[in-house]
Image: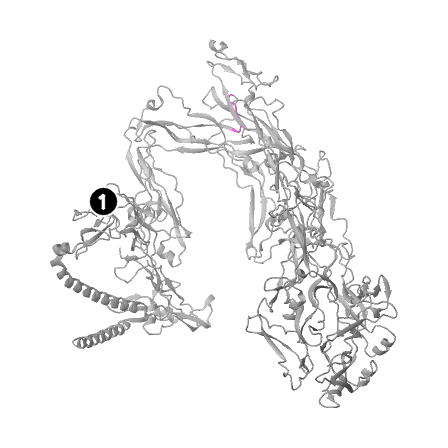
Amino acid sequence: MGYGKPQMTSLIVHSSLFLAFLTSLTHSANAEYRWRADSWSDCEKPYGTCGRGGTQRRNVWCEKSYPVQQSVPHSLCRNSGYDEPLQEQSCYKSCDTVGSYQVRWVVGRWSECQIELQGVDCAKNLGYQTRDVYCVYQITGDRTEDSVCASFNQGKPPTRQSCKYNCPQNCVVGEFSEWSSCDDCRFLNRSRTRDIIVPNNNRGKPCPAFSEMSPCSNCSDKYFLNFTPWSFCQVFPDPSNSRIPYNPYIGNQDRSFDCFNIRGQKEELSKCTGKFQPFSFRQSCIISQDCVLGPWQGLTTINQTCVSRNNVVKSGYLYQKRDVIQIPLGDGKPCGPLEEYIPIKSSQKINCPRTQWIMSDWSECKPIQGHQQCNTGIQDRYIFCVQIDQAGRQTPVEESECSPEKRPLSSRTCPTQCKTDCTVSIWSQWSQCKVTDCEMYARRRRNNKKTGQRYRTRATITEPAQGGQMCPHLSETQNCDPEPCYTWHVKQGVCIPQQSPCGVGISHQTVSCFNRNMTSVVDSRCSELKQQPPTQVQCVVSCADDCVLSEWTEWSECPRICQNNIFPRPTLKHRTRTILAKAAGQVSNCQATLREQGECPTVIECDTYTWQPEPWGPCLLDNPVKGCGRGERNRIVHCYSNLTSVSEVKCALEVKPPVKEVCTEPCPENCNVSTWSAWSECSATCTSANTLSNPSKSRRRYIEVHPKNGGVLCPSLLKEVKVCFDLPVCNQYQWNVTDWSECILHRKEKCGRGLKARNVTCLLNDGSVSPINNCLTSVGQMPVVAEPCYIACEDECLFTDWTPWSKCLQGCGSKRFRQRSSKIGSNPPPECSDMIKYPRYEPDICHCDLIKEELGGEFSQCILDPPKESSGLLRPISTSSKRDNPAPSKGEGKVCGWGQKIRYVACQSRSAAASIRRCSEAVSLEVKHCNIPCPNDCKMALWSEWSKCPSKCRPGIQKRSRYIEQLNSAGGRQCPSLDSTQTETQTRLCHPECSQYIWKAYEWSMCDSSSRTCGDGTQRRVVNCVIVNVNGDTTGITTEDNCAGQVKPHSEQQCRLACVGECVMSDWTEWTECPRPCSNGYQKQTRTRKIMRHASRYHPRCVETEDYRDCIKDINCVDYHWSWMPWTSCLINNGNEECGRGLQERFPMCRTHNEVDVDDRICTQIIGPPEHGKRTNDCEVPCDVDCLVSDWTEWSSCSQTCGIGESTRERVVVEQYTGNGRKCPSDLVQTKPCYPKGCYRWTISDWSPCMPQNNMCGAGIQTRNVSCLGDDGLPADPEKCPPDLDILVLKTEQKCEVLCPWDCVLTEWSEWSKCFVNCADFAIGATQGKTSRSRAIISQGLIPCNDKLWETKICPATDCTSFSWVASPWTNGKREVSCQTSDGLRVNKEACHGSVHPSSVLSCDPPCNGDHMVCNDTNTCGCEADFVALTDIMGQVVRCVEQNSTLSVGAQKKDSEEEIETNYWMYAVVAAGTLFIVFVALALYHMSDFFKNGPRPHGEPKEEKKSIGIESTDTATRISRQGNENCNVCSQIPVPVETMVTTSNGRTEIRVADDSVSNEGES
């Protein structure tokens, strides 16, 4: 390995030299970029002023000097370390005058955007444009030196500026349409067209032809009759010639026509018309009269220009109109605008009057009658719309002025109080008997009066409401005799025998007086109550042969009995002792007292005393003058005993209810109403004799604040109505029509078709002439002025017009008739008398099947109108308040029961049978009855009685249940959830008088020795399971099963009656409690005893005075714990209500470790009271709330002003249903048909095709119809249509031209294309694009078309458009490749010019002849599925081997033994060379990046390179080998090019199958 060190050193040296080279390149590169700047412009100031504050500017750019001088981005100069020159600075503009030698700068137009970079098609913002700027004299315009203008301090405008040198955009067009047909021979050729998609721009290729044409071979023998336009209609030259009829409205006109072949060559007329010439070339005509309008009438202001709250200027308008004096006739000019709206321009910014909804305050919360949930009420309020003016004044206006979407709710639910009974907790334990007056204690004792008190309390859980049961008393007090305030405490000393060592002696004792706090006080305190004990007492030290007695037992329990007599009987307690050793032969020595009695210290009275408060008095205000506000109220509280008032001393002051509290008296609120709205418009604009009632106007005001707390009531008058007396008399107009003139022919004609005319004027009711528009708007369509007529020639049969059809008097199937008569001419031909050929009488059958019945849709929903007396705002679905109430309430009919379904049947006639009674404007109303079933709720049985309380000394659980009597139906309330027994169960807590069970052991009996004098024996005692009441008194004996779980005391034990001289020991004390938790042997119990008599010298000495034993669980040790019982059911109002807010209870239980319930006092003594968990819990049983909906609104006006429409009413859901409540109805909106009147409307047909047609061309006529149609679409009397002046003055005929085949013919303009922005611009924020449309030449004609074929305009773009090659799937080695937009639209191939065209033919060279080799779509060899390709050093596939298999060693040696050895070195050399090339490329890349952008910032996250282009479409996407289960050859094919995308900036983007890498290159 030693040879590696010099090589490593050499590598380090070369690397250092290479880095130094890079550094020098970097410095030299930095030196290439320099800032360049133009000279400063002259000082300029705005508005032509001079002095300080001027500005000078200059152009600054970054320039690269090597190898070619060119402009580059500013960032390169900034990164080079040089400071950027200023582009602007302040200056002083000289104010010198120019005098008569005034000069100025002349500025030329900017040149096209250019770029200095060579070989670059486009560069964003790197282009520049220039312009000529020179100085001239203003008077002469002669050019002079620039310094002349500069000498007068006129700054020279800039001559250069930057610009966008955008990328070139070729024109993009769509696909060709299908070829047109040559069947009608309308043109010389057939054609196909295409539309423009994107116009060319920025030096892009121009658009190709939008059409292609091909000659029509079958149209060479076609001829066309070409008409010239009719001449101008001229009046007759000699009106005075009486031989020619004359009318000022009628003139005559001429035209000519010729025959041409399809190539536009004139032919004989007969080739077009045949032997006859059926076309007229002269006719009578209506003399053209232009529309004549009167002058504009006075301007009327419609709103003022103002600024909205969003700073949007809303223009006001001035309105003016003018009268129609003469409607257009003939070719006269049509009427101009009859009305005009002129925007008001104002410099003053006036705020627009704004409207908003105003709400009154909410009304008082009222209970909803029949609503099941008693704690839910309803409130309502007034909602009205007001307009706010500039001064902020609010004036009520119509509700339509405010936004209906923002209308506030007019009702809401609110909480109300339910009827609730008071509930209280259980009584607490009696307090200790306390001294109320220790100073008076002795005196009261001497007078036999109780000196203390004890009490117990309970708390209010739920307050009474709405007439519920009131709360009982919350405290009870009893008088008692407590332990004395002061007691003697004696401490006895050692007994000292008078004659040692035993016998009678004296014991000294210390006597002290203590109070109840165990604090020493003066002895006189105790002396007043009890005589002071002696300081020394006689005692005995037992001798060896003395009788020995045990110590006194504990005093027995004092019975807690109450005494009411004046001289109460004292209660006693006792204690005992036993003989431990008898005296030697002296029985009398053991005759000491073995039982002792004493007086119990506490006596309790049986009477209880309670505090009873009276109702609160009135609130006494702090400020009575104000009449409301803060105050105080009082009440009297008495002490009672059995409804008898007693002295307050009897009741404990600690629990006395408060007698004062702070109160608040609400202040009265007066009613407040809004201002009056403006007077409405009068119900009529004029008066006439036909008016049934006087026109009137009205105004309203609304309640804003309801009166409260005794405030002033609202006024009753909220609407005022006033009669309009100052209206003018209505004008009456009518058309005045003269008789028809004679039939006037062309002046050169004697018979045939002509025109007749009449005069039509508009008259007022006084006979004066009025403008035509008054009759048009009030009477209707103007009668025609002229109509065609006919003058028969001498050789013609002439008849009158047919009379109208007669009426169908006998209904359907009958006949109607019409007739005409002959006009006798001078020489009628004989055939005119032929009645068959020329009938005079014609019958027809009345066809009733043509009568059309129009129904107003299907029948309406079942409509239940509310009773007239109902005026409530809201209504629940049901008024039944109990789930088990079977009877419907009085208001049940509001939501269920019988109703009506209706529909209208309108009859329209399509035949002449209009006289049939059924066919008229009137409509028939069809009604059928309907029924909405009333809902029936689930009915539950009554609750059973509560079960007995299972516990005797602690809280227990009681149960009750009920079952279903009747299931719900028709949407009634559902039944509650039931348990497995199909019943609903409730639980509650019960509190029996305490009967706890404990073991009670009585005194031990005397030691029963067999010798009756001394020796071993047995002691017995009674152990019972006793019942203990709440006060701890034993009230009885029960079975031992009730004390299970407690350690039972022993009822028998061994003992010894000491003999003379033996040691005498006292009884063992009780075993101490085992420490908890029990630990089975790790802890011990102890007990002790004392030596009562020492043994004589001849007997054994006294044994141990202490004893120990292990604590064993379940033997002598029991663990206890508190266990909380489950919550009871949530009971509302003590179970009297089914839902609402209620109470749950639970209690702790003392249990052993074996989960056996024991006396709670055991846990209290051993582990303390239970943790402070909640014993009661507020709860809520959600009510089965029925859906609450509002009343139906009033029926809306008909949706149609005519014809069959719909009227609607609606209601809203105020409260959704919950739980098992009744669901909301589905019909919150109801509709019913309505028919205010028949519908008639004006309709304007499209212009007819230009006539003539059929191998004719040239000048023609277009007509259109203005008709009054009924709602059946059939023509009706124009008088039934509403007057519309703009329609009534429309022209119905106009000149037109039919193009001849030899004319230039263009298509109609195409639709505007999608707004185009290339994706490169869009990616940097460009949103301004272009949209285009085009038209194509479909017939070139004799004269070439010079019309504009496409146009473009600016548009806002929301996305960009790109172009890409899209290939179809392979089929027999071929596929179709097309250029498409990102929207999938096929376009011309030039749009994808910048990307590689995918191959459309599958061909591999060299061919793929190996086994399992295939030619893939990149025209390279690959392998079939499940085969792996082996390639040579050039990357070509040489073999396909099976996947997951290897060649045998022999085969490898045989086939490639010589190649492998050589390939190792070759691969190594190639790898090393590749790594070196990659290293150099990376270095150069970073150098170029440094040159362009400067040092790269550190610590910034690298941005992922994203391709800008359009994703390939489905047709272009190749199926990858992972996703194609059916392809057997794709798995070994190299990843193909999936999509070649040409982005809008001309760059090629190749996308591979995994869409994770994009390689970009220049096109």
Determine the image quadrant of residue 580: bottom right
The residue labelled by disc 1 is 1401
Q: Position of residue 1503 (x, y in %)?
A: 36, 63
Q: Which residues are magenta?
A: 243-249
Question: Mark 1 is on which residue type?
Answer: Val
Q: Inspect the magenta stretch and tell me whether residue 96 lies in it.
A: no
Q: Quadrant of the N terminus?
A: bottom left
Q: Residue at x 39, y 41 (%)?
A: 1309
Q: Looking at the picture, tell me which residue is in the foreground, 699 or 1292.
A: 699
Q: Position of residue 1122 (x, y in %)?
A: 62, 65
Left or right placement of residue 1283 versus residue 945 in this view: left
Q: Is residue 1377 visible?
A: yes
Q: Position of residue 916 (x, y in %)?
A: 61, 22
Q: Position of residue 1465 (x, y in %)?
A: 15, 64
Determine the image quadrant of residue 57: bottom left
Q: Across the whole image, how many numbered discs are drawn on residues?
A: 1
Left or right placement of residue 264 versus residue 252 in this view: left
